[in-house]
Amino acid sequence: MDGGEERRKRAVGRLCSICHEKKAALKRPKTLDQICRECFYAVFEEEIHKVIVENNLFKPGERIAIGASGGKDSTVLAYVLSKLNQEHNYGLDLFLLSVDEGITGYRDDSLETVKRNEIQYGLPLKIVSYKELYGWTMDEIVKAIGLKNNCTFCGVFRRQALDRGAALLRTDKLVTGHNADDIAETVLLNILRGDIARLGRCTQITTGEDGPIPRCKPFKYTYEKEILDYFSTECIYSPNAYRGFAREFIKDLEQIRPRAILDIIRSGENFRISSSTKMPEQGTCERCGYISSQKFLDVVNDKVVKVGKDFMNKSRAVIKWCKACVLLDGLNRGLPKFGIRRTKDSQKVGEHRVSNSETTVANFESKQCGNLDF
Ligand code: SF4
């Protein structure tokens, strides 16, 4: 009998520690309280409402896009948010926003779930596809680049596709289903990678407030285990080994210390970043016009000459492209590895040279996979 089974058996027969009437049906991972299903639903929704109110996530009258992948997190988020919106009169106009990456046999199924959510929750749905936005499906990208760097393309394109979809819906904010486990993993990954800029940003409940469409994470303190309607759909192209390692490590920690997930988030929140640390800036891509949180690449005569804002040759005209445009340009010119590799100074990338070590495109703030939602 495994530990979880043993705990479930022990919980049976005890009364709910909240209502003291019904039998306890589950043990909450963060508090270890044994409670009945009804009290669990109530307390789960109440905690999310509290997070929304305490962090001033929304204002009455705002249009909110819910990043909906059809996975458990975004499905529960859509349900809970529409319920709280009605019960507490938030006064929000909610929309479902999905991205179709064009992965045969994977995304088709989860998009069916989102279409069911559209009907069940009565929320308008907008689907944006890689094919329509970039001219490529992920199936086609994988054919061109193989299975090694596919998630880099997918992560960068998805992040921008969500922004573009939210802009098409004219929404004020985009909410995503990132949960406490995801954020703890991201804190850990950013520490392991020494990515100070993202470490500072990844624990914020709202990001991009200086841009046109800020992103919020109402599930920031919600444990993955407590997110119901769980169903797992793993992308057929998924490697995600590094994040997988962090996830397993956190699950092991949680076995020993149930509060570990929240403790890691608190640690991330309390990191103080030295004022001398150089942080990347947001800006608008000169090619597609969309905002990018990635560093900008200066492209001159088809060569990436510098990353960031200090140009090597100030007299020369430079073009600043976002990462999605650089990747797309490489794909369209038959140079799929362009902009992909972690580069050292002046390392060659295809026919191009990149002169900064910070051009890695792994974005640990963005959830890359469908089973991780957005
Ligand atoms: Fe895209 Fe995730 Fe599949 Fe990678 S694993 S290709 S990021 S959906």
Image (spheres, helix red, strand yellow):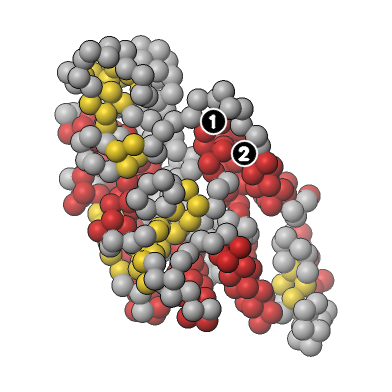
Q: Nearer the viewer, residue 68 or 85?
A: 85
Q: Position of residue 24 (x, y in %)?
A: 76, 78
Dot 1: element: loop
Q: Position of residue 10 (x, y in %)?
A: 82, 71
Going by the image, does 180 lie left or right of 319? right
Mark 2: C-beta under 8 Å from nearest atom of ligand 1: no
Q: Amino acid at mark 2?
A: Leu
Is disc 2 surrounded by few (<14), some (14 to 19) or many (20+) residues within 10 Å?
many
Q: Is residue 191 above or below residue 164?
A: above
Location of the N terminus (image quadrant): bottom right
Q: Quadrant of residue 344?
A: top left
Going by the image, does 287 lie left or right of 53? left
Mark 2 or 1: in front is 1
**Res 106 visible:** yes
Q: Quadrant of residue 221?
A: bottom right
Give the number of the disc on residue 188: 2
Q: Quadrant of residue 219?
A: bottom right
What residue is at 39 percent from the left and 67 percent from the top?
62
Give the number of the disc on residue 195: 1
